């Protein structure tokens, strides 16, 4: 689809604000150099951002002989965005100012049996009530919610959440009816929200082409090009975990055989270890994965062999992505990465040259996510921020003074 002048303006606006968040206070001239935009373009965008209440002038600096330059920063005393990470066992809510700094948070634990839309919404409402009391009169600019499974972004519908057996749940409308909060609500899934979080406050900021590989119970790839999340035609882009590496391989939960997820998802990793060590069957997935990581660190042969086997499959899958997309950066994320990344990522790097083509391999960097922040909540709040920024005037809609 051809970009409109409004699309281009919004992309430029995102680029300016991301640099401003990273390096505030700064000037229009420095922002122009950092974004490769003209000073006039940056000045116009900054004027709109100031009018929108997103940016403020915070002082002046000597310009080396000319007029002192105005210094800019995000309006941290202005409105806030709320990002909600909804998982099978918890609701984690964070409130962010316009510098994407956490100003408040609340968490609700959920029993596995609490899996109806009404019960999940009840926990979101309870967490939101607590932070709203503490926010006082501070304006909420938008609410972003990350839901597991497939999400129809345009209609605000949870299309399919397999662990809850949800089908076509009108979640956004149900949530709006319950909260009675007169602000926009944005829905997406963790894969997309983590990628947006990386764009705004992670390793993806300023990277032209990057992929986030989420390793967890399931696996997927978030893709971003030119500072924008790539969704695909139906918001299904990134189902890398359901690409086939062996048509005769094990059954995947999607119904196909030999998917990369069937080899490197958490259940598959623990199944590999269980063939060699009975500890894989003890406790929860997270407990078993932690035990595997500890056994690998101790040099136990069963754990080392498991990591090597999984890394070989993972390297083949990563090579497919690298060959197809040709990214500048691949970031490993997800709870399995958090538990087992020290073991897996170096092994994948070592094996990747045997699978990837030379040119895209030379161009790509592999990195493990080191953020200690909740990137799901951050990304959900960033979706709300992007929605708020879409209120910017279109190109040429207003004469400049």
Image (spheres, helix red, strand yellow):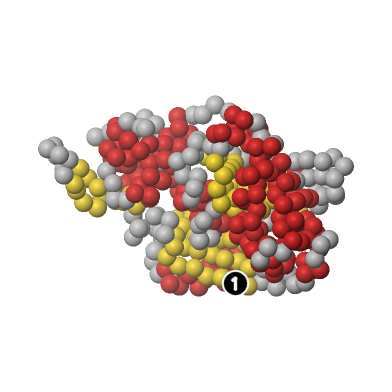
Q: Which quadrant of the rendered structure holds the N terminus?
A: top right
Query: Does residue 159 appear anywhere in the picture?
Result: no
Residue, x 72% and y 67% (percent of image)?
288
Q: Position of residue 194 (x, y in %)?
A: 57, 52
Quarter of the figure with residue 339: bottom right
Front in this rendered view, residue 99 or 7: 99
Seen from this angle, which residue lies furthest left? 65
Q: Residue furthest top?
A: 2
Q: Nearer the viewer, residue 271 or 109?
A: 271
Q: Position of residue 23 (x, y in %)?
A: 34, 49
Residue at (43% x, 45% y) in the render: 389
Residue 221 percent location from the top left of the image: 64, 45
Q: Is residue 1 in sight in this rendering? A: yes
For this view, does 74 lie left or right of residue 6? left
Q: Nearer the viewer, residue 320 or 342?
A: 342
Residue at 71%, 42% in the rendered image: 317
The percent position of residue 12, horizontal first and vertical second, equals 41, 36
86 versus 363 height, above or below: below
What is the residue that sits farthest to the right in this orientation? 248
Quarter of the image with the C terminus is top left
Label 1's element? strand
Q: Position of 115 compared to 60: left or right?
A: right
Q: Return the residue at label 1.
A: 108
Above or below, comparing residue 243 to residue 399 in the picture: below
């Amino acid at each position: 689809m051809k970009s409109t002048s409004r699309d281009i303006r919004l992309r430029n606006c995102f680029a300016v604000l991301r640099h401003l968040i990273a390096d505030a206070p700064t000037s229009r001239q420095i922002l122009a150099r950092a974004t490769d935009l003209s000073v006039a373009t940056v000045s116009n965008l900054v004027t709109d951002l100031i009018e929108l209440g997103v940016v403020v002038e915070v002082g002046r600096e000597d310009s080396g002989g000319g007029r002192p330059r105005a210094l800019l920063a995000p309006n941290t005393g202005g409105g806030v965005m709320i990002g909600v990470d909804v998982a099978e066992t918890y609701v984690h809510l964070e409130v962010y100012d316009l510098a994407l700094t956490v100003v408040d948070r609340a968490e609700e634990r959920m029993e596995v049996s609490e899996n109806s839309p009404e019960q999940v919404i009840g926990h979101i409402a309870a967490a939101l009530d607590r932070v709203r009391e503490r926010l006082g009169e501070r304006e909420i600019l938008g609410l972003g919610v990350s839901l597991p499974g497939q999400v129809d972004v345009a209609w605000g519908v949870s299309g399919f959440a397999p662990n809850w057996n949800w089908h076509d749940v009108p979640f956004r409308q149900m949530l709006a009816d319950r909260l009675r909060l007169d602000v926009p609500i944005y829905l997406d899934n963790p894969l997309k929200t983590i990628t947006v979080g990386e764009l705004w406050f992670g390793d993806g900021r300023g990277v032209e082409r990057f992929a986030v590989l989420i390793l967890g119970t399931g696996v997927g790839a978030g893709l971003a090009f030119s500072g924008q999340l790539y969704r695909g035609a139906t918001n299904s882009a990134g189902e890398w975990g359901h690409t086939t590496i062996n048509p005769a391989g094990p059954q995947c939960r999607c119904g196909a055989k030999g998917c990369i997820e069937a080899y490197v998802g958490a259940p598959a990793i623990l199944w590999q270890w269980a063939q060699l060590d009975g500890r894989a069957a003890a406790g929860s997935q997270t407990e078993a994965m932690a035990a595997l990581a500890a056994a690998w660190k101790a040099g136990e042969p069963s754990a080392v062999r498991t990591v090597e086997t999984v890394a070989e499959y993972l390297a083949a899958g990563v090579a497919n992505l690298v060959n197809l997309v040709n990214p500048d950066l691949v970031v490993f994320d997800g709870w399995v990465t958090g538990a087992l990344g020290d073991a897996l990522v170096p092994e994948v790097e070592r094996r990747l040259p045997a699978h990837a083509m030379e040119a895209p391999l030379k161009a790509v960097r592999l990195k493990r996510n080191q953020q200690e922040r909740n990137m799901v909540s951050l990304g959900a709040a960033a979706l709300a921020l992007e929605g708020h920024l879409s209120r910017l005037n279109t190109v040429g809609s207003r004469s400049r003074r």
